[in-house]
């Protein structure tokens, strides 16, 4: 098995708000990965005294632990429990009803000898390579559909008709894209935050196949270097408009 990961902050003076971790239980028959992309808070920090990195570390750590230790629970159930556990950790000090209370996008994958289970919530990306080399992107495309319709997405966060992230409401997991694939049908997989997927989704110079090929050949660090070069070529976002000229970028590759 090959596992590689890399992460870069968008700028040097702001902490990286992404989270990534992979666990391989001692049984040796499976594993799990969790990738989160924290949502940058407003000036009032979303009514929370904690930072986004605090939140993503708490939520990501809880989700990874539950994914490994509670095999009888689905990934959606694990995420619900992780959200509840994280909310309880700061419910007494923070306004969890604030629409921009700390939150994150989620990709979670769990595998064993029989199957590969996945969950995607919001705009991070999961790429699944089948045994015959076919590549399948698993996407929660709500944000893309809203943007394509000319809708301003920010006011529709975690609202009906909008898009959803993992914040303080465990019921949000019902909105996630989930599924299960036979283990024999999966050769490799990769997870990317939207900052690492910019060569495809923002700059339009690559497709998912090219992105996966680069990950396999040169590793996640090479992909992030490519994305940074594209951002450097358009530092003000004039040629390719985007919310942040530079974004946190994290990628993980797992070859089963």
Image (cartoon, helix red, strand yellow):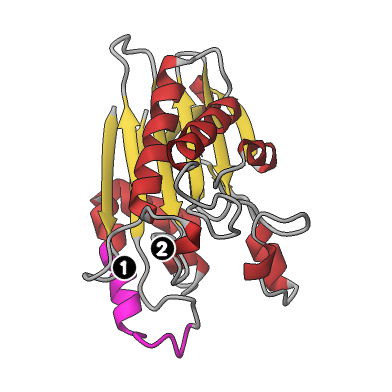
In the figure, 244 relative to 119: above or below?
Answer: below
What SS does tag 2 mark? loop
- Residue, far right: 161
Q: Where is residue 97 in the image (x, y as percent from the top left)?
A: 61, 52
Q: Residue at x 47, y 59 (%)?
A: 39
Quarter the N terminus occupies: top left
**Which label sits in the foreground, 1 or 2?**
1
Asked whether residue 130 is in view, the answer is no
Q: Which mark is residue 48?
A: none
Up/down of 208 relative to 189, above or below: below
Task: State yes or no: discs 1 and 2 in contact (Cβ < 8 Å).
Answer: yes
Coordinates of residue 189 in the picture (x, y in percent) = 43, 38
Quarter of the image where the C terminus is located: top left
Q: Name the residue located 34 percent from the left edge and 76 percent from the top edge.
A: 230
User: Residue 165: image x %, image y %?
Assistant: 58, 50
Q: Is residue 221 left or right of residue 118?
A: left
Name the residue tied to disc 2: 195
Please indicate whether residue 187 sits to the left or right of residue 135 in the image. left
Say which label, 1 or 2, has the lower sequence index.
Answer: 1
Q: Is residue 65 magenta?
A: no
**227 in magenta:** yes
Please name the residue that numbered disc 1 is placed on: 10
Which class describes the residues within 10 Å of circle 1: few (<14), some (14-19), or many (20+)?
Answer: some
List x then y, in percent, for residue 167: 54, 47
Query: Which residue is at the far front?
Result: 92
The image quarter containing residue 66 is top left
Q: Where are the magenta residues, as a range?
A: 225-240
Residue 213 visible here: yes
* Mark 2 neighbour density, 10 Å: few (under 14) some (14–19) many (20 or more): many
Q: Nearer the viewer, residue 12 or 181?
A: 12
Q: Is mark 1 on a helix, strand or loop?
A: loop
């Amino acid at each position: 098995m090959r596992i590689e990961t890399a992460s870069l902050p968008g700028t040097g003076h702001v902490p990286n708000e992404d989270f990534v971790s992979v666990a391989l239980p001692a049984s040796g028959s499976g594993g799990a990965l969790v990738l989160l992309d924290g949502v940058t808070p407003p000036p009032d920090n979303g009514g929370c005294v904690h930072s986004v990195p605090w939140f993503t570390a708490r939520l990501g750590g809880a989700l990874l632990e539950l994914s490994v230790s509670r095999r009888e629970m689905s990934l959606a159930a694990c995420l619900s429990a992780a959200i509840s556990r994280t909310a309880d950790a700061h419910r007494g000090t923070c306004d969890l009803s604030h629409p921009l209370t700390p939150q994150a996008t989620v990709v979670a994958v769990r595998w064993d000898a029989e199957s590969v289970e996945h969950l995607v919530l919001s705009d991070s990306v999961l790429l699944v390579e089948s045994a015959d080399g076919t590549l399948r992107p698993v996407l929660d495309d709500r944000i893309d559909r809203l943007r394509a319709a000319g809708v301003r997405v920010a006011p529709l966060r975690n609202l009906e008709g909008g898009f959803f992230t993992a914040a303080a409401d465990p019921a949000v997991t019902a909105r996630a894209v989930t599924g299960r694939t036979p283990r024999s049908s999966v050769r490799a997989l990769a997870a990317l935050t939207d900052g690492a997927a910019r060569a495809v989704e923002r700059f339009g110079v690559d497709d998912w196949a090219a992105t996966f090929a680069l990950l396999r050949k040169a590793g996640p660090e090479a992909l992030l270097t490519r994305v940074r070069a594209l951002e450097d070529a358009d530092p003000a976002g004039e040629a390719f408009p985007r919310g942040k000229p530079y974004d946190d970028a994290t990628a993980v590759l797992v070859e089963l």
